[in-house]
Image: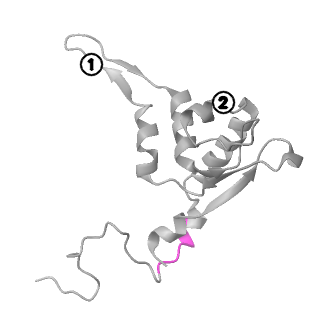
Amino acid sequence: MGFLSAYSGTRKIPVGDPDSGYWVEIKECLTSGDKEKADKALTSGKIIPGQTPEMSMDIVRYRQLVMQASITDWNLDDDGGKVWPIDLAHIRKLPTPVFDQIYTEIDEANKPATTEERRDFRTEGLGGDSDEDAGTTDAGDVLA
């Protein structure tokens, strides 16, 4: 099991009327790459030489983009039974209570680990990720 395996899980969240059977599947943990587009919504602005910088934070867009990055699957559909694509247009169609429910689950899943969770982290069996450089040294290599 590699390092990233500990962060690659998903979970299904029931949404709407419990008898409807609707659900949304979210990532247990976003990567920094998953969140990059959303983070940019929090750091936009204009800098014009000689003027005070204008900065803005689009929190609504940030939340929508975090949700889009987090959702891996869902069974939400239209009146004809066609499942919606997972895109911003359909995320914006979510009723506010459902959006807030899903976002709360995503936010909770991505909170930093507590001190106790960090202390219990196991390192045995950890490996690299798919971006690992083939020339990287391992514990058995000696650098001269």
Quadrant where the C terminus is found in the figure: bottom left
| Res. 116 image quadrant | bottom right
Question: Over which residues does the magenta segment extend?
Answer: 118-123
Q: Which residue is mark 2?
A: 93
Q: Count the marks: how many?
A: 2
Q: Residues within 10 Å of mark 2 (few under 14, many from 20)?
A: few
Q: In terms of secondary structure, what is the magenta stretch mainly?
A: loop
Say if 91 sits above or below 127 in the image. Answer: above
* N-terminal label among 2 and 1: 1
- Side (left or right) of 129 relative to 116: left
> Could you tell me residue 108's position as x and y percent?
64, 49
> Could you tell me residue 48's position as x and y percent?
24, 14
Residue at x 32% of width, y 66% of height:
131
| Real-space Cα separation, disc 2 to disc 1, in angstroms | 34 Å
In this rendered view, identify the residue nearer to me: 49 or 87. Answer: 87
| Res. 41 image quadrant | top left
Amino acid type, label 1: Ile
Say if 103 sits above or below 8 in the image. Answer: above
Q: Which mark is residue 47?
A: 1
